[in-house]
Image: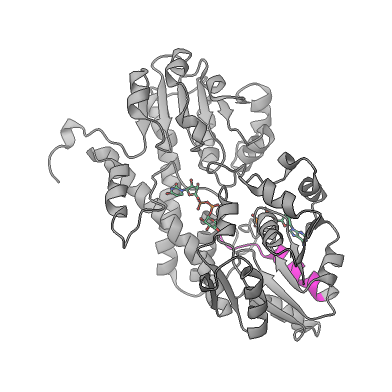
Amino acid sequence: MKITCIGAGYVGGPTMAMIANRCPDIEVTVVDLNEERIAAWNDPDLSKLPVFEPGLDQIVSEARGRNLAFSTDVNKAISEANIIFISVNTPTKTYGTGAGQAADLKWVEKCARQIAEVVDHDVIVVEKSTVPIRTAAMIKSIMSAVGKGDKVKVLSNPEFLAEGTAVEDLSEPDRVLIGGEDEAAIQCLVDVYAHWVPRERILTTNLWSSELSKLTANAFLAQRVSSINSISALCEETGADVDEVARAIGSDSRIGPKFLKASVGFGGSCFQKDILNLTYLCDYFGLPEVANYWKGVIELNDWQKARFAQKIIKTLFNTVADKKIGILGFAFKKDTNDTRESAAIYVCRDLLIEQANLAIYDPQVSLEQIIADLEYVGITDARQLAEDGHITKVTSAAEAADGAHALAVLTEWDEFKELDYAAIHETMLKPACLFDGRNIIDRDQVTAAGFQLYSIGKGEAKEAQWEVR
Ligand code: UDX
Ligand code: ADP
């Protein structure tokens, strides 16, 4: 059995490494057009892997050279495979019809066309990338158009791994979802996962349910975060504590405790993209009420990010111009180097528009990445700002704090919980403010050190608001 995966990104790389690791009898080849990325996957120095995930280095090192290979020879890998995973990027479209909303499927289509051109044998094509419902129909018609409809069976097998916990999620998934029409093809993929996933956790459905389940899962998860974030704002006005509310409601087994952590806003490559895609599909199918319902999840998230930046500006006497602000964390969550749609990008943008000087510390994110992200959201002179010292990437939280008016925790890296806040406070300008966008800071400790602390959803009820409404 030979498996090929097209796309060596955050999904393709770790997923294939796990398949190879758990299935020594299957030869797995991951291909990508990006030579630099493939070289990094092949680098003997495992710290250079292009995706940072705890535990991934070990999974890769055990399988690489045995039954796991990374290559740029896409055609060869396609021609030899029994199963081909399509795991390329499907970002939000930036042009033409559906710009800013629909998923851009040009890379998926290119892969499908390349497979159609190259294969001359029976093969199973698996959609791993997150795609709009009915994408499998497009792949099938491309195969049929060149007379290969009978040779190529199409399955949907969305990936539910979350970044930062990819290895854990892949080794013990809550479920594996396989959608398809051809029983033999479905069984073949079930057998791959059954090497390590209990059979009862491998769900099979029709193609369209599988495609739609991925978008729906992400929409539901994002909705929970927006729901608790909406309540965080009300907590701040009324004296309630959002973490206490989350605990209280999460203890109801119908609601459950996960994904109720209030924050500066959700980020990541999936939530926003997938909800935008969902709303586009709803509008397309004449369901504007459904589209609007889900749009609210994104609007609330945008508001939460803006609200946090505004809180910083207001607290610093309505001006941050020329003030140093230390930014702790730039990745969209801890334990990843991924910054896609990170709330930090938008908070930093809003502060830079107000002419703040930012000293950014993140253990995994490079200055180049920060500049690229800020340019993308409209800070077109980000590189110049970095050259002039208005944006600096520093190597520790202490350095970010030194001489700063404020610190803002934007990613929940564990190390930020354990900082010596008393020592840090001494090096800062007074009043020294700490804005905790992740609610990870110990209030007693930092207030004892002298900080003025703002946390998400931790209100101090104001006298005027004590009246019952
Ligand atoms: C998500 C889904 O969880 C995963 O199943 C899917 O395959 C891809 O999209 P990911 O984006 O990697 O995974 O991370 P996730 O852990 O879901 O976090 C997304 C964002 O929500 C992060 O910015 C995180 O900080 C934020 N979040 C999450 C909260 O603010 N509060 C929470 O309670 C949970
Ligand atoms: P994801 O988070 O979904 O894994 P990434 O952007 O991290 O997305 O990775 C997708 C990868 O797919 C990129 O490395 C890109 O170079 C690769 N890719 C896109 N189109 C093709 C193609 N036609 N052939 C090979 N690789 C491709």
Q: Is residue 229 left or right of residue 248?
A: right
What residue lies at 63% left-to-right and 47% top-to-bottom? 55
123 drawn magenta: no
Does residue 403 lie above or below 419 as drawn?
above
Q: Residue furthest left?
A: 467
Where is residue 447 shown, x and y percent of the image? 34, 22
Quarter holding residue 91: bottom right
Where is residue 140 shown, x and y percent of the image? 70, 80
What residue lies at 73% left-to-right and 42% top-to-bottom? 46
Where is residue 8 shown, x and y percent of the image? 73, 55
Image quarter of the N terminus: bottom right
Q: 88 or 199: which is nearer to us?
A: 199
Does residue 327 lie above or below 421 as drawn?
below
Q: Main secondary structure of the magenta part?
A: helix
Q: 144 or 319: which is nearer to us?
A: 144
107 drawn magenta: yes
Does residue 294 lie above or below 204 as drawn?
above
What residue lies at 64% left-to-right and 27% top-to-bottom? 385
The magenta-colored residue range is 100-116
Quarter holding residue 357: top right
